[in-house]
Image: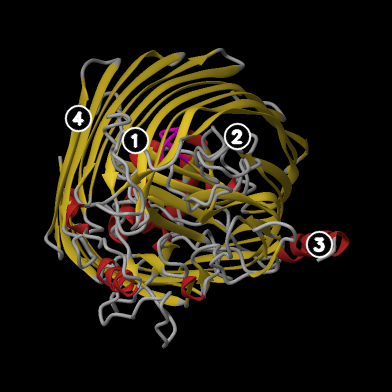
Amino acid sequence: MHRNSLYSSLLAGIAASALMPAAVWAQESAAQAATQPAAVAESATEQASQGGLGDIVVTAQRRSESAQRLPLSIEVLSADSLRKAGVSQATDIARIAPGVQIAQGGTATQVYIRGAGTPTTTPLSDPSVSLNLDGVYVARSQSFGGSFFDIERVEVLKGPQGTLYGRNSSGGALNVIPATPKLGERGGYVQLGIQNYSGVSSEAAVNLPISDTIALRASGQIVSRDGYISDGSDDDKHQSARLQLLFKPSDAFSLRLWGSYQHLGGRGPGNVSYNPSASTPLGGPDLPDNEWTSVVPELNKRLALLRAPRRYDSSDSYQNIDAYNLHAQADVNLGFATLTVVPAYQHVSMRAKNYPGIMYSTVSALTDEGQVSKAKSLEARLIDNGGSPLTYTLGLFYFDENQTNASTVDLATVALAYSALLKTKSYAAFGQLSYELFDGFKLIGGLRYTNEKRSIIDGKQFLLPRYPSTACSATVTTPCASSLNINTSLKDDRINYRAGFEYNIAPRSMIYGTVSTGFKSGGQTVADVEPYKAETITAFTAGTKNRFFDGRLQANLELFYWKYNNLQQSLQRLGRNGRSVSTIINAGKATSKGANLDVIAKVTDADTLNFAVEYNKARYGEFIWTAYTTAPSTGCAFSPISGTANYSVDCSGLQMARSPEWTGSAGYTHSFNVGNGGHLDLGANMTFASSRWLHASFVPNAHAGGYALVNLNATYTAPEDRFTVDAFVQNLTKKAVYTGGDQIPAIGGFFAATIAAPRVYGVRLRANF
């Protein structure tokens, strides 16, 4: 699409959207109004009292605002909707959020929004969608899995958030907002749950008023569930705890202290066999009768055909992750504005072994630390207190992370070992303003400057024997080949911006248009390959948000056009020295364009319908990379480079990985009054996605077909909300949904996939006090 026709389409979309609405999510009851800022709470109470949809207050732009008044695409999932949908980890969000794909790659959580994401699992990689817990950037996604308890809401922001969130939010942001301490309130809840796959969970929270100015909130969760995959992997064994203390001596000052711990154990994520074609060539696995069959037995068949003397055995796979988080938030009301300061410290240690192709484990001869991340950050924000046509958010940000890593990649004949010390430092200054030119019409502007440095210190790569073999004669302390030593630093300066407008064309209708930018850090792999550049994006959006019929109908629409430069992709390939390695490379250009429509209708006081659909045409415009020393295993066109042993690979024009053209959902809920103020809610919803590539290798076995998932839930709420009982069925038809995967290094073309949960059913009982 030419630029002029793009702008014409966006302008036409704005005009059309004023009459034909659409795009955010969510609904809430009037009971939540008590926890919202006064002006928004009054609006929510008024609409709910008239039988309409209540407002949802979010802090996506670092201030409390109604989601329906934000000039961006945001999906908000309340605590109640998360519980009814059975969301217990980040991957569950993909079932209820169109345009969002989430998978577990090794121990890392991989989030994609409209094709923007990173499938790598190594400490060298950073996300395209930033993960934020209680307003603090999560440095390592391995510590994110056990965070979904005692939650107030989850916010999914689509599109680059370069001004307020900064680095590594080029595709958007996922914010988890926990419940916080409340002064003068004594209460809490206890929740117990059981499900198939021997699943047992318990969760509890308590809010205690220590004095008129001090409150304490303690919460925790324990989950134990067997694995979905035949070898016992894809289980969930975690324990989490969180403690918060609020001190508020006056309306002018508050201080909240936070400490949390979580342990993730068990077998960890696994892979399954996947071959969508009827044929079973050497490079592809047989398709088992049960889609949740581990890939390991099939892989061993292929290794036997190759006469490799070693076989894989996944019985000793494990993960052992410990995460500690400390942070504070101080708010000082200066009269004209509020100053917020948020210092934070995160410590994550991980030792894990994942099969089949890539396994991370401690290499004791090199270091006994495994992977350890220590990150500290500090953010200071000055936000106006309102009462003026000018609103502003100004801030400073500092981030410092040190990582140590030692890992091995099993190549069936030998093992490739890595070790490195990784350092990242980032500084930023930012500001976002809006100014009301006339009644209801605002101009928006934002700017962020980022300076960062990423270093690899004493990075090593060498071969080790994995079993007695003539492949090399060596010991653990005497490698088969001389070490590759890497000591390098990359510095970057970036300016990101946001500009646009919003116009309230009616009391409950607005239109908006924005252009915004973002970036994801570049870096270097511990391998004999070229460094990768920073990924950048420019996004054009136009949308409208509306409420009709006394707030009973909500209709939101957004049109978007995203332009990427140096889009980062992960590939398993050979380095210049002929050693296999998982690397990050840059696709020169890519585009993502489409539309998102979201409708919620409260047909009667007891009946609610919702429908959402997103179309996204995401294509690589220029994706050319170099395969070293031997012909690559890829579905892309490639040709030898004259005078070398290398090959040029061209994947231009193909659909971006993990970006289905169509995604959506539809649902219906009916509420029955059950005597003395109790009620029973019955709900059904369906989510769907069209076909997509699981990986940028584009081998035939990396292409997955479309799917539709059906979920059912029933919730009884006792009078005065004394207790609730939830019964649920997820993936009623047991549809196999493949979420990602990778090639097996030892066998070209062999693809091992990750897979979502099969049919899951259970019951949860929650008692409030």
Residue linked to disc 2: 166
Q: Earlier in the sequence, mark 2 or mark 4?
A: 2
Quadrant of the image for the N terminus? bottom right
Residue 298 figure quarter: bottom left
Q: Write down the region rendered in magenta.
A: 131-140
Disc 2 marks a residue whose amino acid type is Gly
- Tell me: 399 left or right of 430: left
> Residue 269: horizontal and vertical position, in percent?
29, 55
Quarter of the rendering containing residue 150: top left
Label 3's element? helix
Residue 747 coordinates in the image, percent (x, y): 42, 66
How far apart, in angstroms, are the residues tagged by discs 4 and 3?
Answer: 55 Å
Q: Residues within 10 Å of mark 2 (few under 14, many from 20)?
A: many
List the residue tagged with mark 1.
478
**Vertical arrangement, residue 34 with respect to residue 21, above or below:** above
**Who comes first in sequence, dot 1 or dot 3?**
3
Q: CA distance from mark 1 to mark 4?
A: 63 Å
Give residue 582's position: percent from left, percent from top: 48, 50
Amino acid type of the residue that numbered disc 4 sits on in the rendered structure:
Arg
Instruction: Tell me: 601 left or right of 198.
Output: right
C-alpha distance separating marks 2 and 4: 38 Å
Element assignment for label 2: loop
Look at label 1 and name its amino acid: Thr
Q: Is residue 315 visible?
A: yes
Q: Earlier in the sequence, mark 2 or mark 1?
A: 2
Callout 3 amino acid: Leu
Report the side of 424 relative to 22 (left or right).
left
Query: Mark 3: few, some, or many residues within 10 Å (few <14, many ≥20)?
Result: some
Label 4 sits on residue: 186
Q: Please name the residue that numbered disc 3 is placed on.
A: 6
